[in-house]
């Protein structure tokens, strides 16, 4: 009776690399731990099993496998760089099967990279080189937009040993820069890259002052950190455009005052070196021509609450009304109140509740074209 193949190898894989190396006949070897799994896949006894691998490791006695029994083999063995793959085969009286895997070795790595601008035109680059293989002579280089910084000679590192490299890089112009690091030793290499942008112009010390309810004063510096240039800048709200010649390290102070209508506002400031945008800033604010300055609770009990609000007119004399929605009822002012420019009024409102609970409050003030609102809560 011819039986079907009874051996199935499910996997062959490298489990880990050991952090130690040996030398055999002058060739550096690194230990790898590998494992494979095989199974007798039919419901009967299978006899005369054995296995071997191309690394020279094999079973020295034959054995039998019960129905559906599994075999797990874990191997630790030394390999040199000339060993590029591993194949393991399993045999029985009924058939055989094999699987292969590629061997990979930990070599050298770039670790702990960090870059810091120490000046507007100087970058300090720092990184570690760590050796995970046997003793190696390691070289490194840094390329930055055509400039090359490199080790003068190889650095000898034992397994597990690392060295720290610090290199100062000087730039002659602003713009986008690519920092590329490469380390190598024989067949082992590693690379790391970073893109940074150096700016010649920047917005510094920006302040937004509230002059009154509708007017804002913007104050900022435009600073040139590089050689003499013409700085172009614009603002969106109010719409302004200007240009100025700035020497190296020279600054221009800009002061803008604007009176706004009611609503949510955005002002965007941009600066350019020629046509290249160097910096920008977004300021978001709200203008209220009539405003609720506060909404507070004066008194609460199980059946009523008393709240007060300070209302302010930020523009020309206006007639202002108000209303409070306390969730249970809507309470309105019975007459308009005339407020002069910058004048305030105090509104005190009593609410009565039919049952205890938490009542959201919505307080609104209105003039013919303007309004504001505030929210709160009453507990009774």
Image (cartoon, rainbow, N blue to C red):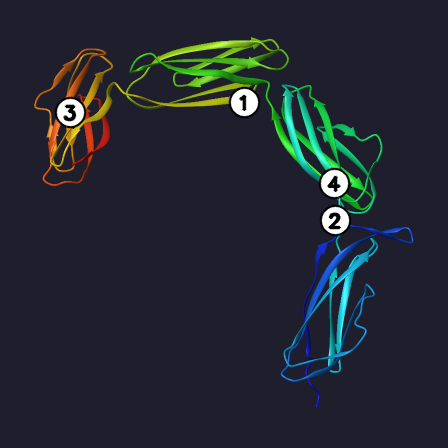
Residue 287 horizontal side relative to residue 103, left or right: left
Give left or right: position of 281 versus 278.
left
**Disc 2 + disc 4, Cβ < 8 Å:** no
Cα–Cα gap, marks 4 and 3: 72 Å
Q: Earlier in the sequence, mark 2 or mark 3?
A: 2
Residue 125 or 220: which is nearer the viewer?
Answer: 125
Which of the numbered marks, if any, corresponds to residue 106? 2
Question: Mark 1 to mark 4: distance in Å?
Answer: 40 Å
In the displayed image of the protein, which residue is found farthest to the front?
301
Q: Earlier in the sequence, mark 4 or mark 3?
A: 4
How far is the residue under mark 2 from the one under mark 4?
A: 10 Å
Please name the residue that numbered disc 4 is placed on.
130
| Total marks placed | 4
User: What percent of the width, then of the height, locates residue 296?
Assistant: 22, 26
Mark closest to the chain's N terminus, 2 or 4: 2
Q: Residue at the spot x=68%, y=84% of the render? A: 45
Residue drawn at x 8%, y 21% is: 335
Q: Nearer the viewer, residue 251 or 20?
A: 20
Residue 322's disc number = 3
Name the quadrant containing residue 140.
top right
Circle 2 packing at 10 Å, graded few (<14), some (14-19), many (20+), is some
Indicate which label's residue lies in the foreground, 1 or 3.
Answer: 3
Using a 10 Å C-alpha cutoff, classify the residue at mark 4 as few (fewer than 14 neighbours), some (14 to 19) or many (20 or more): many
Identify the mark nearer the N-term, 1 or 4.
4
| Element class at badge 1 | strand
Tell me the residue that label 1 is attached to.
277
Helix, strand or loop for disc 4: strand
């Amino acid at each position: 009776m011819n039986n079907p193949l009874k051996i199935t190898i499910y996997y062959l894989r490298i489990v880990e690399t050991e952090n130690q190396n040996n030398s055999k006949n002058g060739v550096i070897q690194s230990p790898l731990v590998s494992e494979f799994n095989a199974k007798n896949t039919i419901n009967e006894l299978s006899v005369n099993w054995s296995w071997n691998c191309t690394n020279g490791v094999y079973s020295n006695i034959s054995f039998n496998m019960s129905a559906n029994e599994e075999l797990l083999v874990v191997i630790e063995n030394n390999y040199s760089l000339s060993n590029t793959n591993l194949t393991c085969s399993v045999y029985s009286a009924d058939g055989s099967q094999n699987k292969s895997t590629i061997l990979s070795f930990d070599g050298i790595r770039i670790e702990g990279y960090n870059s810091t601008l120490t000046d507007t035109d100087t970058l300090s680059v720092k990184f570690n080189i760590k050796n995970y293989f046997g003793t190696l002579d390691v070289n490194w280089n840094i390329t930055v937009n055509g400039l090359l910084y490199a080790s003068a000679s190889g650095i000898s590192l034992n397994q597990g040993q690392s060295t720290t490299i610090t290199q100062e890089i000087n730039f002659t112009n602003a713009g986008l820069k690519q920092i590329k690091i490469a380390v190598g030793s024989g067949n082992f290499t590693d690379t790391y890259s970073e893109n940074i942008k150096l700016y010649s112009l920047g917005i510094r010390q920006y302040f937004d002052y509230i002059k009154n309810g509708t007017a804002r004063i913007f104050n900022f510096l435009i600073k040139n950190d590089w050689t003499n240039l013409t700085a172009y800048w614009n603002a969106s709200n109010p719409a302004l455009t200007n240009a100025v010649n700035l020497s190296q390290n020279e600054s221009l102070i800009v002061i803008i005052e604007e009176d706004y209508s009611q609503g949510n506002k955005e002002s965007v400031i941009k600066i350019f070196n020629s046509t290249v945008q160097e910096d920008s800033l977004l300021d978001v604010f709200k203008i209220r021509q009539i405003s609720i300055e506060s909404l507070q609770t004066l008194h609460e009990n199980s059946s009523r609450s008393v709240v007060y609000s300070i209302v302010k007119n930020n523009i020309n004399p206006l007639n202002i009304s108000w209303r409070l929605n306390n969730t249970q009822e809507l309470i309105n002012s019975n007459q308009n109140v005339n407020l002069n420019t910058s004048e305030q009024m105090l509104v005190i409102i009593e609410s009565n509740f039919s049952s205890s609970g938490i009542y959201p409050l919505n307080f609104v003030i209105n003039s013919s074209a303007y309004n504001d609102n505030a929210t709160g809560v009453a507990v009774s």
